[in-house]
Amino acid sequence: VLSFIIFICYIASLAASFMMAPLLEFLLALFLFFAYASKLNEKFKGAHWPLADFLRCVTAAIIYFAISIAAVSKYNDGASKAAGVFGFAATIVFAIDFYITFNDLVTFLKQGSSDCPEGRKTE
């Protein structure tokens, strides 16, 4: 939802060149939401779903932080400032999601290492 709000703010602002990042992040988050909701992660075991979610969070936090700094410092209209402020809030939200997803990713990787014979020898 926050990505969609930021996308709308960038459309209405002079910083419309930044609108692609929130749009892509919104669509990617929507895809992962529907993938988890429809249990695609259980059907397609070959894909590393926690890793995909982890990388999405990391890249989103970095990109939102960078474009928020640019939007707040370079453009003077209200919509750009609002998009920058929402972008900083999204950076914090994605950093928290990054931490939570990192713990899930570690659990996922530990499960995978116990399935291989080399992991059992070391344990």
Image (cartoon, helix red, strand yellow):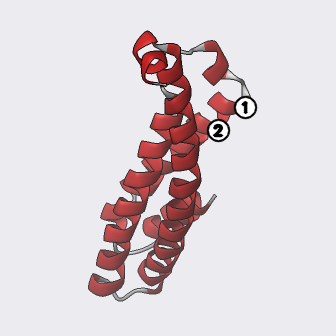
Residue shown at the point (55%, 44%) measured from the top left: 29
Q: Position of residue 121 (x, y in %)?
A: 44, 16
Between marks 1 and 2, how big is the CA–CA gap? 6 Å
Q: Is residue 72 visible?
A: yes
Q: Position of residue 104 (x, y in %)?
A: 58, 42
Disc 1: CA contacts within 10 A as few (<14), some (14-19) or many (>=20):
few
In front here: 118 or 92? 118
Tell me the quarter of the picture where residue 32 sits.
top right
Residue shown at the point (41%, 53%) measured from the top left: 58
> Disc 1 vs disc 2: Cβ atoms closer than 8 Å?
yes
Q: Is residue 8 visible?
A: no
Give the total number of marks visible in the rendering.
2
User: Given the image, on which type of amino acid does mark 2 rest?
Assistant: Phe
Element class at badge 1: helix
In the rendered structure, find residue 37 and report the number of the disc placed on it: 1
In front here: 37 or 47? 47
Residue 66, compared with residue 56, is above or below; it is below
Q: Is residue 88 found left or right of 43 in the rendered image?
A: left
In the rendered structure, find residue 9 and report the number of the disc placed on it: none
Disc 2: CA contacts within 10 A as few (<14), some (14-19) or many (>=20):
few
Element class at badge 2: helix
User: Given the image, on which type of amino acid does mark 1 rest?
Assistant: Ala
Q: Position of residue 3 (x, y in %)?
A: 54, 59
Q: Position of residue 1 (x, y in %)?
A: 64, 58
The residue to which callout 2 is attached is 33
